[in-house]
Image: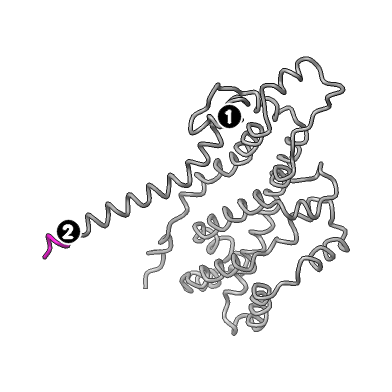
Amino acid sequence: MMRHASVTRRLFDMGNTIFLIALSLLCILPIIQVVAVSFSSSSAAAAGLVKLWPVDFSLKSYEFILKKKDFLGSFLISIERVILGTGISMFLTVTLGYALSKEVKDFRMRTFYAWYFVITILFSGGLIPWYLTIKYTNLLDTIWALVIPGAVTVFNVILVLNFFRGLPKELEESCFIDGGSHWTTLWKIYLPLSLPAIATISLFTIVNHWNSWFDGLMLMNSPSHYPLATYLQTAIIQHDFANMRAEDVKTLAEISDRTTRAAQIFIGALPIMAVYPFLQKYFMTGLVMGSVKE
């Protein structure tokens, strides 16, 4: 009986491993293909010869992109948006989560505010009121239009709230006994113990700001204010044929819209791929285990 269970367990582990490997390949192969196209010649990309390895290796697409002021400008706008948006969003999320994690006897208006935020998940004001609100607060065509309207994600607040409520009450009580305030409890005790939850939500917020393109298209009047995701959705290769020089003609022959777009997508994905390894180590549970002994 035990031998049969062992064989079944091995078969399950083998099938699970094969499934996860196949799933990983489905996720990574498109990225590899995009990278291969970006490093290939325009003729090879146009002919569909590029699979998972560059054909006629070329850096012309990257040279062309890095000289484009509009691409570099949108890249910097996205970085600014991520820094401001993530900082403001995490501050509001953590402080809201801490306040709403209290019992009614400690925060009498807790139930009212909790339902106030939950209703925003169930019902939406719609696209037109959203746009008019931003317009009449004079946020259009500014970086704040990309940051403030979505600063509070109620789902993230609920995650932080539940995480805080799972922390031992003795930690908060000991801080109050030592003369600490709610701010001291939040920043000195709750926040360090909540790094896994904070890191996960921060990563979600960073990715959301970096990949969001619709709000940039709606709220920015000038294409020079587009974030990178919006720029990639609308950008096309344009050339001034009347003033084109000999070296420009040569460059045009060596690049194409497909290779240039692939290079732009790869450069746009690099920051997120660079951030993820630093946050991955916090994706674990049990940091609180053993912190309080009854």
Q: For mark 2, what is the residue?
A: 6
**Front-most of 23 and 253?**
253
Q: Residues within 10 Å of mark 1 (few under 14, many from 20)?
A: few
Position of residue 135 in the picture relative to residue 20 (left or right): right
Q: Quadrant of the C terminus?
A: bottom left
Residue 217 shows in this picture: yes
- Tell me which residue sits at (43%, 63%) in the image: 288
- Foreground disc of the pair 1, 2: 1
CA gap between label 1 and label 2 equals 52 Å
* Magenta region includes residue 4: yes
> Between 175 and 9, which is closer to the camera in this rendering?
9
Task: Classify 288 as above or below 106.
Answer: above
Q: Nearer the viewer, residue 76 or 127?
A: 127
Label 2 sits on a secondary structure element that is: helix
x and y, in percent, of residue 126 in the image: 75, 69
Q: Quadrant of residue 208?
A: bottom right
Q: What residue lies at 55% left-to-right and 21% top-to-bottom?
A: 56
Which residues fall within the magenta stretch? 1-5
Is residue 181 visible in this depiction of the protein?
no
Residue 293: x and y, percent?
37, 69
Q: Which mark is drawn over residue 47?
A: 1
Figure quadrant of residue 7: bottom left
Category of crowding for the residue at label 2, using alpha-carbon neighbours closer than 10 angstroms: few (below 14), some (14–19), many (at least 20): few
Residue 213 position in % (x across, y down): 71, 51
